[in-house]
Image (cartoon, rainbow, N blue to C red):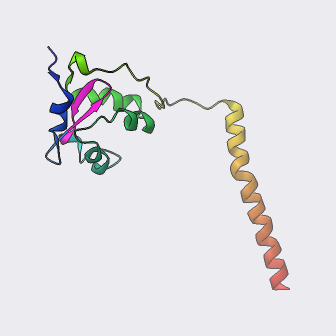
Amino acid sequence: MVKEYTIAQVKEHNSKKDVWILIGNDIYDVTPFLNEHPGGEEVLLEHAGKNATEAFEDVGHSTDARERMDEFKVGTLVAAERTADIPKKNTTEWSVPAPDATESSLKSWIIPVAIGLVATVAYRLYFMS
């Protein structure tokens, strides 16, 4: 059975030695994850004892990151304090880019390199003469 907590109870866990965050309607104890968090512990400490849903969704965590969250889940909000589900956005899915995206990517670096080479040759010819 999943334990339920109030927002007031989550707020009590706001120190470096005891970090709980709320994402959606789920509560996570991320204290053991502070040193491992790719964004640094400051990000988690900033949201300690608070609702971090918007910040979490805005970053665009990978599917792997979302799956790993389960190991830190300690409970959910009591039914009276739950909010409507916030749609997940910016989930990073690794896929092969479309062919025209690759072509556009090539143009984005080949043209500046070509301009740089032409400028270098022109510079050398002008100042070496």
Q: Quick check: is 22 in the magenta stretch?
A: yes
**Magenta stretch bounds:** 20-32
Location of residue 79 with respect to 125 vertically, above or below:
above
76 part of magenta stretch: no
Please state the total of marks drawn on the protein image: 0
The one of 116 and 28 positioned closer to us in this rendering: 28
The quadrant of the rendering that contains the N terminus is top left
From this view, report whether residue 43 is shown above or below residue 102: below
Residue depicted at x 79% and y 76%: 123
Q: Visible in this render: residue 36?
A: no
**Residue with the most extreme bottom position:** 129
Corner quadrant of residue 74: top left
Please indicate, yes or no, whether residue 58 appears anywhere in the rendered image.
Answer: yes
Which quarter of the figure has residue 52?
top left
Q: Is residue 78 left or right of residue 87?
A: left
Q: Position of residue 33 (x, y in %)?
A: 23, 41
- Left of 7 or right of it: where is 90? right
Quarter of the image where one finds residue 32: top left
Identified at 54% across, 29% down, the residue is 95
Q: Nearer the viewer, residue 43 or 108?
A: 43
Q: Position of residue 11 (x, y in %)?
A: 19, 37
Please name whichever residue, 23 or 63, is drawn nearer the observer in this view of the structure. Answer: 23
| Left or right: 12 as drawn, with respect to 58 | left
Q: Residue at x 81, y 84 (%)?
A: 128
Q: Residue at x 17, y 32 (%)?
A: 8
